[in-house]
Amino acid sequence: MVEKQTKPKAVGYFHWSFRIAASVWIAWFLNTPTQYKSFFTLCQQRNYQEAVLFSFLMSILVTTGVHYTSRKLDQYWPWEKSLWIRIIAQLLLGVLGMILIAYLGVKLYFRLVDGDIESSNYFTLEFPLVQMSIITLNVLYLCYYMIVKNVKPKPEDKFLKGTLGGKSYFIAIADITYLLRAGKVGYIYTKKGKTFHIDYKMTELEQLLNASQFFKVNRSLIVSLDAVIGYKPVKNMQCLLILNQDIPPEIDLLVTRSRTEILKELLGEREVKLEEEQKVLILKR
């Protein structure tokens, strides 16, 4: 789960239907207000139909480009962690890159229809609107990102859903000692000794739980680091976890060599002392 720490929770941004609707509006906006004819008259002109269709396709390309560019940049340079690098990257890729794509697309369109782009007034009328639309779209994505990142967490962000005795409960993540997956059935064990059934898969739990607070021991077990009081080194540079709560003996607390190194990193800021008699590392609280 440590690798999850390096990547923030992804922002989904706008649904594809919104991008299509925005592209329809942009196509209309670029071709209609600059014409001094009624919309009905324009719709009957072949050159207007072609221009609107081309503008729509280019808008789809550009809005999709801004969408996936923003999502990719979120992974490497989130706004709140790498502000200046992100500003530069967003300007280069999300703004200037999309403007360049639009420019090349327009040049290609005029070549295909044998038009003269220089005498068409396109760069004085329509292209400034294209640039404004691309800048506005980037600003809109930034605003969406800030709203999502600053919105108060939903109940399920701090709680997990579970069942006990045929009743459903929200279990506070802070109350969880460990989570177990046995076949197709999942369990939550709390600090108060209660056991709840859950439907989450291990991959879902890894995404929902904070990687700095929970440790994946193996494919079926995740433990709260607050429940870890120490670990006992065993052969092959592996270790056995020691929890502050008794657990069934059939639950495997053996941590593999690679996972042991990750565990030590997670516990790095916590001091440990070696009890010589048992050769056990106990955390100092």
Image (cartoon, rainbow, N blue to C red):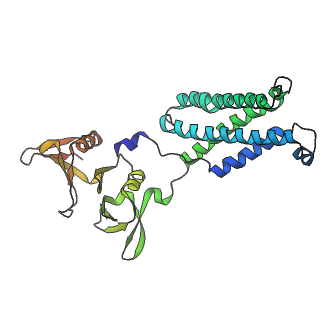
Residue furthest to the bottom: 166
- Residue 227's place in the image compared with 198, above or below, is above
* Residue 272, x across and y down, in percent: 19, 42
Examine the image and state in which quarter residue 253 appears.
Answer: bottom left
- Residue 74's place in the image compared with 241, above or below, is above
State the residue in front, 129 or 23: 23
State the residue in front, 146 or 22: 22
What residue is rendered at 8% in x and 49% in y? 278
* Residue 137, x across and y down, in percent: 68, 39
Is residue 25 shown left or right of residue 11?
right
> From where the camera sits, is residue 79 visible?
no
What residue is rendered at 67% in x and 50% in y? 18
State the residue in front, 140 or 220: 220
- Residue 173's place in the image compared with 263, above or below, is below
What residue is rendered at 63% in x and 29% in y? 97
* Residue 255, x across and y down, in percent: 22, 48
Residue furthest to the top: 118
State the residue in front, 82 or 174: 82
What residue is rendered at 36% in x and 47% in y? 211
> From where the camera sits, is residue 147 visible?
yes
Is residue 45 shown left or right of residue 61?
right
Count up the numbered dots: 0
Residue furthest to the left: 277
* Residue 280, x across and y down, in percent: 13, 47
